[in-house]
Amino acid sequence: MCVLLKPMLYIEESYIVQKGDLVDEMLFIMQSKLLTISTNGGRVGFFNFKYLRAGDLCGEELLTWALDPKCSSHLPISTRTVRALTEV
């Protein structure tokens, strides 16, 4: 797995993942700060905010998807939007 890791750079205020996108990568955050925003089952006006920092993961849905024996060949769909608050 380590052979497949590659460094990525996202500029400040860029969107890394948007709700509804396919989750096709997992990010291991080495530095900076990100904001994740999700809704509670699509309820209007209800948002969950969470900050991600160095040591956190983004895209962990891929682990659940890959470990599910009933998983399809279709990648999971993101239920949240992830935005870089600073350069990541």
Image (cartoon, rainbow, N blue to C red):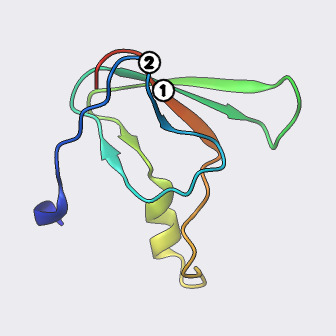
* Position above or below: 23 against 10: below
Residue occupying the far left of the picture: 3
In what element is the residue under mark 2?
A: loop
Tell me where residue 49 sits by quadrant.
top right
Left or right of residue 28, residue 5 in this image: left
Q: Position of residue 22 (x, y in %)?
A: 55, 57
The reply to whether discs 1 and 2 touch (Cβ–Cβ < 8 Å) is yes
Residue beneath the point at 60% across and 84% down: 70
Residue occupying the far right of the picture: 44
Front-most of 38 and 7? 7
In what element is the residue under mark 1?
A: strand
Q: Which mark is residue 13?
A: 2
Q: How busy is the neighbourhood of tag 1: few (under 14 within 10 Å), some, or many (20 plus)?
A: many
Residue that carries the numbered disc 1 in the rendered image: 83
Residue beneath the point at 34% across and 15% down: 86
Q: How busy is the neighbourhood of tag 2: few (under 14 within 10 Å), some, or many (20 plus)?
A: some
Alpha carbons under labels 1 and 2: distance apart:
6 Å
Q: Which mark is residue 48?
A: none
Left or right of residue 61, residue 29 in this image: left
Front-most of 67 and 77? 77
* Position above or below: 68 against 2: below
Please state which amino acid type lies under the numbered disc 2: Glu
Q: Position of residue 5 (x, y in %)?
A: 18, 55
Please state which amino acid type lies under the numbered disc 1: Arg
Quadrant where the N terminus lies?
bottom left
